[in-house]
Amino acid sequence: MTLLLSELPGTHAEVVGWLEGHLVGLQLSRLVTELAAVHGAQRPAESIRGVLGAELSSVLADGLRVLTPQQLGRLMKQPFHLFELQELVLAAGGAHWQQRMGERPLPQRIEPNWQPDEGFRPEPKPRGRSMARGVALVAVGLLVGFATCYLWLVGPVFPPKRPQPPQVASVWGWNKPDATAKAETSRAYLTRLSDLVEEWYAGVPEADAPNRKLLLAIRLLELRSGCTRLSLTDHPLPAEQRDKLKARAAGWCKDIDILLQNVQEANDLTVWTPSIDKLVQQMADDLRAGRLDR
Amino acid sequence: MSRDRPLKTEAKPPPVTFIVPPLAPDDPNAPTGALVPLRDTNSDDAIMAETASGDTSKFGVLWARHNDKLMPIIASNCPSEVDREGVAQDTWSNVITRAGQYEPGSNFAAWLFRIGTNAAHDATRAAKREAAKRKRDSDERGDPVEFDDPRGYVDPDLLAALQGCLGELPERSREIVRRRGENEDNQDIAVTLTLSPSRCSQLYHEILRNLRACVEGKLS
């Protein structure tokens, strides 16, 4: 075992980054246990809102760097407050915390062991739609979720524990592990991103493919997850160019959301596939040309 | 903060969503991919309202938006031996079945976290019951199953082991660990303990190595 406290940095600035990483990470419980042992801390009666007061909104907006070393020290001395702070930053944290989440490593795996026919359904409501429609839509929604989840987090590394739908493909495009690896020049970096997004075309379901709507939605969700990565990664580019790329990617993510929504609602997919192809081509062209201004 | 009520956040300006207008395949003059403002049908509230009425077609959007934030909450509320992905799946299925209880205008993520926390606690209780049962089966002595933490899981075995090992440290070593654990930097600690900052850093890591060995011994 490793004690997390052995990784505690020696300066305030470094502790800020280290603690923020734990607040958006998966080992906060362990860290709180270690700090509670060091300080003999008990669960506090008061809320962190009372401890941080007006500073709380600054922390949610700009992170722990707004706290003085003494304020941060008080948080570490009463580590149970970190649990409440974690909920707050994940539920209502601003762009700073979103960025921190984007920097954390993805979980190693997630088991796609939900089955869409297990009968999850909303509790009956007086004005509800027919149950049959509800169950069918739950099945589609969950199937999309599972497949995306599997592709996104497991990829080709872990073999599936259960048979997977035939449409499951390998990780592609911006989801590839080396998509955002450092390149020799900014131009080479952007060109690689451009090439990667054009992999979209290799996996678009054929017009006569069974379950085409579902396959297209899954493909779009994969594109969306790659876009999220693009918008949250600290790219190895000059600061101005990096910020422009992240902002541009955030705009693309919104466009993909809209297209996904419309694909899900569409009766005729031929109406939407040209728009999707156009957006992908626009992204590829802009990246290749270095056009990052929104 | 009450556990039973969703967190309220600062008022935010309403998001603006753009809908791509449908293209007429047979119209060569139809706009291609132009975006015009229309309505926000992808918000958490809108998707939850549709889910409550039985339409979960956009539920994947909600999942993609929030699952990454849910996992740390679950990890903070159950021991590592609990299947956290399973807890996440239970959480999302509960979101569907309880969609009618969600209050539009409140913070969906906070509401999701409450469900996730409860699911994590349920899974922890189940794991503890199972462990107690195994213990009863092995030595015919059962421990009561207790788990009443309002927020966050602290491993009682690790806590006790650490406290025991810290108690065995010399006072000076304990002070270094305690002060580093209060965000005091090596420079300040070194001044009061009449050490050099680098020696202070070196000592801290030596102490932590010994502490780890001690904890491993107690837990094994």
Image (spheres, rainbow, N blue to C red):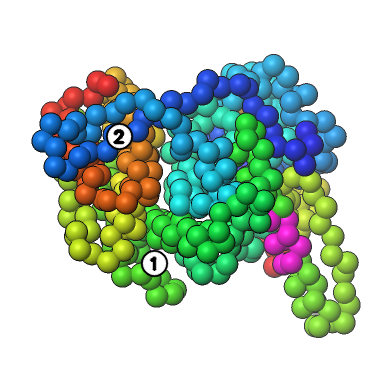
Q: State the residue lying farthest toward the top.
A: A54
* Residue B80 located left or right of residue A270: right
Q: Which residue is mark 2?
A: B20
Viewer-side residue, A43 vs B112: B112
Viewer-side residue, B102 vs A147: B102
Residue shown at 70% from the left, 62% from the top: B123
Residue shown at 62% from the left, 49% from the top: A127
Q: Which residue is mark 1?
A: A158
Q: Can see residue A16?
A: no
| Residue A283 percent location from the top left of the image | 21, 35
Residue shown at 23% from the left, 45% from the top: A271
Q: Can see residue B22?
A: yes
Mark 1 belongs to chain: A
Residues at circles 2 and 1 in contact by the CB criterion of under 8 Å? no
Identify residue type, mark 1. Answer: Phe
Residue A11 falls inside the magenta stretch? no
Q: Residues within 10 Å of mark 1 (few under 14, many from 20)?
A: few
Q: Residues within 10 Å of mark 2 (few under 14, many from 20)?
A: many
Q: CA distance from mark 2 to mark 1?
A: 37 Å
| A259 w.r.t. B188: above or below | below
Question: What stretch of residues is rendered in magenta?
Answer: B119-127
Identify residue type, mark 2. Answer: Val
